[in-house]
Image (cartoon, helix red, strand yellow):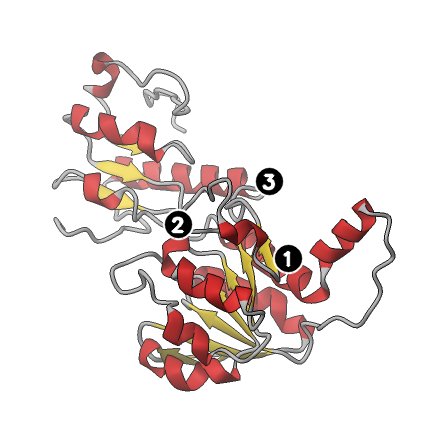
Amino acid sequence: MPDDLPVTVWDGAGSPPGAESLATVEFLVIPYGRTDAAVPILASAPRLRVVQSLSAGVDDLVQFIPADVTLCNASGVHDTSTAELAVTLALASLRGIPDFVRGQDAEEWRTGSRPALADRTVMLLGYGSIASAIEDRVAPFECAFLRVARRARATPRGPVHPLDALPELLPRADVVILTVPLTEETHGLVDARFLARMPDQSLLVNVSRGAVVDTDALLAELTAGRLHAALDVTDPEPLTPGHPLWHAPHTLISPHAGGNSSAFLPRALRLIRTQVLHHLAGEPLENVVPTRKS
C-alpha cells in the first residue's frame, strides 16, 4: 500500500475500531469469516464508500450495505482453492475414500471395485469462474461436460445451457457440481423434482451454499440409497449435532472448507491492493455486486 495511506487493521475477532477511526474510513474490507462481527459497524462509518468482501458469495451481507456504498465480492480469489476441493470431494466420494478411512480405523482391508471419475458426464451448475476452474482440473480425467448457467451462451469449450434446460440435462449427468450463488432464484433450486431427475447412483457435489439444496429432499434420496452426496456446505450450517445428514449413507461432509486454504491469502491480498488503488485513483472497481439500492 502507499506509505502515506492511513490504515486501521481489525481482524474481526477483537473489539471493532472506535468511533474516531470509523469516522475517517472510506474503504472497509470485511474480515474473512467475520461478516456478523463487521455488519454492526457499517452504519457507524459516515465516509464509507466501498465495502470489499473476501467471500465470493455475499448473500449474508448485501442487505446491510448503505445506499451510497459500493459492495464488491472476492470473485476469483477462491477459484483455485474451491475448485481443488470440489475435485477432491468428487474423487473421494466416487473412489470410496471415507470407507477406506473407516476401514483403516477398524484395521479392515476393504477391497472391491469403485466408480472412477473417468468417462463420467459432469454437470457444472453455475458456470462462472469457479466452475471454469473446476473444468480445468477435471478435463484430464477424460470426462464429458454439461455447463449450465442462468442464460445460454457459447464458450470456446462448448455451449452453456440455460437453467430451464435442467429437466432434459439432469438424466445425463453422472456427477452434478453446484457452484451457483445463493439468490432468490437458486434458493431451494435442488429440490425433490431436481433430485428425482438425477440418475441412480449419481453424485451431487455442493461447494456453493447449503440453502441451494432442499436438505429434506436430499436426505430422502440418500436414505433410500439412490443418490450419493459430497457436501462442503449444508443447510443448516454449521450442521447441528444429531442432524440426520451426519449419518446419511453415501454422504461425505466437509466443514465449508472450500476457500480456506493456503491459496487464499496471497490472492486476497492482491485483490485488496488492486481495489484500494482503484479507489484512490477514482477508477472503476472490480467485482461490483448490484444491490437493491443500486
Q: Which residue is mark 2?
A: 56
Q: Looking at the image, is mark 1 or mark 2 earlier in the sequence?
A: 2
Which residue is located at x 31 percent, y 80 percent? 164
Q: Is residue 58 left or right of residue 82?
A: left
In-front residue for pair 257/158: 257
Residue 146 position within the rendered picture, expressed as x and y whole percent measured from the top left: 49, 79
In-front residue for pair 81/23: 81
Which amino acid type corresponds to the residue marked 1 in the rendered image?
A: Thr
Residue 97 tag number: none
Residue 273 position within the rendered picture, expressed as x and y whole percent measured from the top left: 40, 37
Residue 259 position within the rendered picture, expressed as x and y whole percent measured from the top left: 51, 46
Name the outermost residue toward the bottom: 168
Binning the other alpha carbons within 10 Å of mark 1 as few (below 14), some (14 to 19) or many (20 upward) gives: few
Circle 3 sits in a helix, a strand or a loop, which is it?
loop
Q: Which residue is mark 1?
A: 88
Q: Is residue 123 left or right of residue 290?
A: right
Residue 213 visible from this viewpoint: no
Residue 198 visible from this viewpoint: yes
In-front residue for pair 232/73: 232
Binning the other alpha carbons within 10 Å of mark 3 as few (below 14), some (14 to 19) or many (20 upward) gives: few
Q: Which residue is mark 3?
A: 262
